Amino acid sequence: MKKYILEIATFISGAIGMIIELVAARILSPYLGSSNLIWTCIIGMMLAFMSLGYYIGGRMSDKYPYRNVMSIFVLITAVFTSIIPLLEIYIIDPLSKTDMPLTAIAIIASTLTFGIPSLFLSTVSPFAVKLKDKQLTEIGTVSGKMSSFSTIGSIIGTFLAGFILIPILGVKNIILSIVIILCILSFMLYEDKNYKFVIKSLITYFILIAIVLFGKKMFFKLHTDIILDTDSQYSRIWVKDIDANGKKYYAVQVDMAYESLVTEDNELTDNYLKYYDLCDYYNNSDNVLMIGGAAYAYPTYYLKNFEDKKIDVVEIDEKMTQISEKYFELDRNNSRINIYHQDGRTYVNNCDKKYDCILIDAFKGTNVPFQLTTYEAIKNAKNCLNEDGIVITNVLSSLEGENSKFLQYEFSTYKSVFNEVKIFRVDTSLSKDELQNIILVGFKNKNIVPEGKREKYENLLKNEVLDFSSNKNMVTDDLCPIGV
């Protein structure tokens, strides 16, 4: 192993670099979201600090071509990685609550939490090249070999983190594992170890591990409302236990948005969910599809209140379903509900069933999966409907002003697909230029108002917006300025 220690170091540094980048997105998501803007900042700052690290590593390796110096850089990476849980609490969280532009916050947060570890980690590769061939013979071969090991490590680290580590271990345990691996690597790289060095190293390593564990403990101490902080392949998920106005609520938060908010008796508190009952008003829907299960607040309510009807739910994240069973009274054994764990767009693209109504609730606040907003997606959803079928979609937008772009784009897109489109305003106490839940209803064919049910749904129907217009074009798979 000693013969290949430099190759091992280069491989490990490449793998850990990519794992840290994926962990970065999970750490930031509850505070800043996971939009393209956030990913751009994370990737951009990572690359910037890696470039700086390569440069510094090259200069330092020429001046101090020793494995001991390389070992110190690896240990410094472990030090800065160990404080990431504390930085999440004391830097990222407070920053996210300031009035600074989101881009500025993302750049600062990425720099302090993940950029600096990336800088020191990137010094490993130029050190390895220098130490592998001090006489500069066949330097091209040596450089190419080390770059190959680093890249292979990055590939394995990417797949390992995305498919296995994040959904199984979670970000805090991954950070702890990274610190331990870096400490071991630093120890292995150091030459001429003596008794005092071993004792000092062990003390240092235990301190770094203790810092990670302390940060993990402090997170729950400072966030007493969070009863579960877990990761799936798709999201970082918080389950919250909230006391407000003398009532107890359970909530699921994904990124910055609440997916569901219900009372301890599992009653709906999100008013926008009640607008999905319009499927009963407009066509007495017996067979409903819901895209976006979240905590299954509405499907559970639907099964309880419409005892003769069926509902299919498409939820991409199986862990969300498991959480809903544990905390939100989802009964997967109910014969009237079918659950499909796949992307909503994939489902409607290949749908071989017909539904009376499709409910879309897959938009996480302002973080929007664009593939469900486009003409092609809505057209495929329409093809899944019976002749008098409807689609009901919840969007977070304003009716007027700068924040109304999302609604304008979607309204134009729905108008291009459906025979008729209606808009409902969930909270009339908000001004038209404030972000709010807006309900879009698209009718496959002519809207026929049924008799005898209007009184039951009058509190919803009275909030229809009759004067909305859009100056935006429809969005397509090719050009979609939504969710960026």
Image: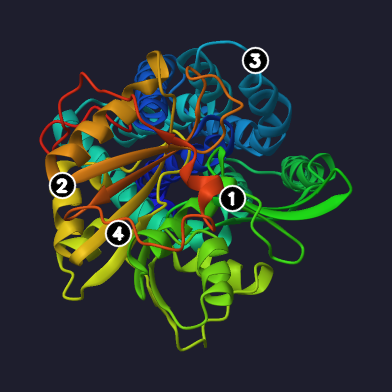
Q: How far is the residue under mark 3 from the one under mark 2?
A: 44 Å
Judge depth for marks 1 and 2 and give the one in front.
Answer: 2
Q: Would residue 342 be seen by someone viewing this image from the given angle?
A: yes
Q: Amino acid at mark 2?
A: Asn
Query: N-terminal of the two: label 1 or label 4?
Result: 1
Q: Residue 419, which numbered label?
A: 2
From this view, report whether residue 144 is shown above or below residue 1: above
Judge depth for marks 3 and 4 and give the one in front.
Answer: 4
Q: Residue 14, which numbered label?
A: none
Along the viewing direction, whichever of 411 and 121 lies nearer the viewer: 411
Q: Amino acid at mark 1?
A: Ile
- Decide: marks 2, 4 in contact (CB < 8 A)? no
The local secondary structure at tag 4 comes to helix
Query: N-terminal of the two: label 3 or label 2?
Result: 3
Q: How far is the residue under mark 1 from the one under mark 2?
A: 65 Å
From this view, report whether residue 5 is shown above or below residue 257: below
Single out the residue that lies furthest toward the front.
451
Q: Residue 184, which numbered label?
A: 1
Q: For the C terminus, give its image quadrant.
A: top left
Q: Which residue is mark 3?
A: 98
Q: How far is the residue under mark 2 from the one under mark 4?
A: 23 Å
